[in-house]
Amino acid sequence: MLTKIKFFQKDTTKKDIVLGILLVLGLIWLNTFIHQNSFSDTYGDFYFLKNFAITALCTGFFFFLKELVFDFEIFGDDTRACVAGTAVTGILMMLALLLEMGTDYVSIYTQKEIVLGTFIIHKKYVYGVWTIVWFPLHIDKIFARMRQERFRFQSILYGCISIIGLTLEGILLFRPMANIWLIDLVVFNSATLILAVWKYAINDARLRKGEIVAAVLSYVIFSVYLLLLQCNNWGKEFSTFMCGENWNEIKAVIREVVAHASFWGTSGYLRNSASVHSWLLNWNKPILQLLYYGGWISVIVVLLAMVCLLCVLVKMLGIKNGRIHKNWLLYATATVMFFNDVVSGTLYAFGFPCPVGLPFLRETGFTDWMAFALIVFCALENLQIQKNKCPDSAFVLAETLLGKQDSYQIFDEFDEPYREELWYDEVTIIGSGCEISCDAYWCELEGREFCVFKPQDFRIREKRFILEFVEDRWILPDDPENKMKQEICQCYAKVNVLRCMDEEMEDRDEEFDDEDSEFF
């Protein structure tokens, strides 16, 4: 299991976020250098950095918009709603097919661009959004609903229909793309499904692990079979299937550069080779261009930086929090994309026919920037989750903030003495020469009434303290062994679940049993 590997048990830290950002900025600088020196087009000093910032801001906007669209259950809260959504999408795609067949100003399926009248966008810009955002979000919702419905046969059936529908939609949409795009689509979709099974199903006692493995393998086989039906250049050499007809020419250039590159700096042979200059001009092959400009040492440094970045991304992902992190599946798929691209991009750079660019060193890095921004958001959420899982560190003695008194005066928002047991209140506490505005959370243990107070002042808002309500008086709790404090901390953590955390699924009403009987 992933969580049993020591490296994956480590907490996310702020240092990981800073190191990840620095590594990405370094790769962006390197990409700028390569394009300024190897391309005839003019690239400004901040061209890629500016695009990265814009993409990160747009991703942040989506990140908060997603909370409104998906977290408030606009699409329903059960697997039946998931099937209904799949049916609606299927109807819309059939309508788009009819429009494409009957008009000249709509194209969704047959070209590498999406054409809607005068609006044209290349599908490579949609590809990243689909694979690391749209598909994972829907798979996450489907599995969450199946778990909520206790993996009944009906919910599993509905979930499978929705998953197959999503898979078919992706293949139809990206059918005109080169074979490598379709292969990566299968890889990412399969990885997303496997991660969803790990998060939601593998530890569920109602399901047998053998059946789970069989279901995942069935999906992978189904996806590969669909891939065989859609790819081009069948019956030809593997290199032609992957890269097209000119692979032999590309491979010859790769061999020439690799064979004559020096360990440090530009070799005399490459500097004087007209054919190498001709190929490397306006050709986005960063490893070959690094071999030309800096020699093998520069390539080794960049590949080590890539490995370091992958390790940092895994720590930022927070695998130990994966099962309680609400949007973890989306972030995990983005991390899988980076692993896939680093491995495939490195192999391609040294002559293996899998045309994938290295992350942050592509001519268009929209998907890389979006994926990294999402993982940064993931890391920030992990910091909150880790703090929520260890509430003891946030709790301090009340007298450290209020001063020590026999009792304290607390007033509600109407300036009345506070004694009503409302679940959530805003109150003002009068201490020794101070007033603190707080949010109050009640807790009853062993017949005693306590209240956890969360200060609103930004200077101390991370702290929590406890007071006990006895005979209409607010006093310091009598808890010499801190047993009550530990129980109160656990209770407080359970009822104050963060928005970025999955709540524990409680047993639902008998409505599902009734629905099952109606269904059958």
Image (cartoon, rainbow, N blue to C red):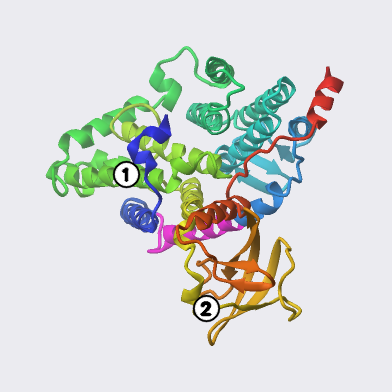
Spatial distance from mark 1 to mark 2, Cα to Cα?
51 Å
The residue lying at 48 percent from left, 61 percent from top is 53
Q: Residue furthest bottom?
A: 433
Left or right: 221 as drawn, with respect to 481: right
**Which residue sits at x=78%, y=34%?**
509
- The image shows residue 397 at horizontal and vertical percentages of 48, 69
What residue is pinned by disc 1?
A: 306
Give, as a three-letter code, the residue at label 1: Met
As drawn, 176 above or below 389: above
Residue neighbourhood size for the residue with mark 1, other residues' Cα within 10 Å, grouped as few (<14), some (14–19), many (≥20): many
| Mark carried by residue 211 | none
> Which residue carries the number 2 mark?
402
Q: State which quarter of the image contains the C terminus.
A: top right
Q: Does the image show residue 110?
A: no
Q: Main secondary structure of the magenta part?
A: helix
Does residue 357 belong to the magenta stretch?
no
Say which label, 1 or 2, has the lower sequence index: 1
248 over 419 or under it: above or below: above
Was residue 44 drawn as part of the magenta stretch in this picture? yes
Quarter where residue 219 is shown: top right
The amino acid on which the numbered mark 2 sits, given as a three-letter code, is Leu
Where is residue 90, by image quadrant? Answer: top right
> Horizontally, is 240 left or right of 108 in the view?
left
Estimate the x, y position of residue 402 in percent, counting from the top left.
52, 78
**Could you say where residue 424 lies in the image, as x and y percent from the top left?**
69, 63
Instruction: Choose mark 1 or mark 2, whichever is in front.
Output: 2
Badge 1 vs badge 2, beta-carbon distance below 8 Å: no
**Residue 469 position within the rendered picture, expressed as x and y whole percent measured from the top left:** 64, 67
> What segment is highlighted magenta in the picture?
41-61
> Where does the N terminus fall, quadrant-wise?
top left
Q: Quadrant of residue 192?
A: top right
